[in-house]
Image (cartoon, coloured by chain):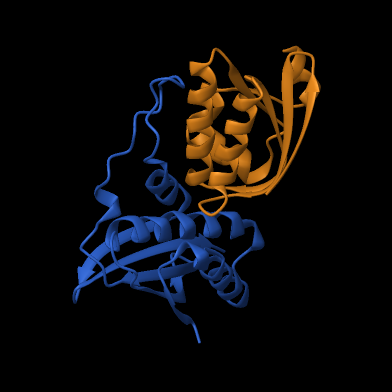
Amino acid sequence: MDFSSEKIGKYYTVAVAGRLDATTAGQFVEQCNDWLDKDETHIVVDMAGIEYISSAGLRAILASAKKLKSRGGEIRFCALAGMVADVFKMSGFTAMFKIFETREQAISG
Amino acid sequence: MDTLNVPADLDNLYIFQSFILEKGKEMGVPVELSPRLELVMEELVVNVISYAYPNTRGKIEILCKLEQHEGGQRFCVQLRDWGVAFDPLSLEIEEMNLDVGERPIGGLGILFAGEMTDSLTYKRENDSNVLVFCFDFS
């Protein structure tokens, strides 16, 4: 998986690309630990580059969200499409997290 | 060959997924179903690795076939392992209306497998676990 990040206002925005599955979920958790090490606790994850996600990927996201919340932070998502949007909806993640169409909306919303 | 026999290892996940995508393509399964095929394959393979082979590294056999079903066609994948008896359909679906702090981590895989297939069955047969999942198309 590829991660590229940018600080915009109080939000640390992270564009994630690739497959978020049982073989790569650990990379997402490691990224979250990096954010926390840098005291970045308000995260926007741009999902436009995610082509596939499974329950293992969702577990990594949920585990990260719990860590961020325990530090007073939050995680938001934008640009979900195709099967990624379907899986978020089916799992209740769409209702549980703040989801936006664009990165700009996620930062200002 | 419409059968694949590979060690139950996460490193082989893409081999399992590629195999059923390739067989599906050969058997005329619409490409729109590909994400569902891949997802269900992963969820069930991960379950086998975690629960049927918790301390051992056995094999998984995959068999693909095309059937006629109610005027349309049905693409079925049979997944067999020789691990301890484990029926993933017996797992409880987790509570979904909880917030981030309360929500348990896990339990989504079998929900996806059930929601994304048109048929999902389990049986214990000759000391093996046999899961069959199917997708209907016309």
Q: In which quarter of the image is residue B128?
A: bottom left
Determine whether, in the image, residue B103 is placed left or right of residue B37: left
Q: Chain A is shown in which shade?
A: orange
| Residue B6 higher or lower than A44, as above or below | below
Residue situated furthest front in the rendering: A37
Which chain appears blue? B
Q: Where's residue A108, x and y in %?
A: 76, 12
| Residue A45 higher or lower than B36, as above or below | above
Which residue is at the front of the view, A20 or B132?
A: A20
Q: Where's residue B18, x and y in %?
A: 58, 69
Which residue is at the front of the view, B117 or A109?
A: A109
Q: Residue sitting at 43 percent across and 20 percent down?
A: B101
Q: Residue sitting at 27 percent across and 45 percent down?
A: B91
Q: Residue sitting at 38 percent across and 48 percent down?
A: B110
Which residue is at the front of the view, B133 or B12?
A: B12
Q: Residue sitting at 67 percent across and 49 percent down?
A: A1
Count of numbered circles in the view: 0
| Residue B39 higher or lower than B56, as above or below | above
Residue situated furthest bottom in the rendering: B1
In which quadrant is the C terminus of chain A drawn? top right
Q: Quadrant of residue A45?
A: top right
Q: In which quarter of the image is residue B106?
A: top left
Q: Where's residue B58, x and y in %?
A: 33, 72
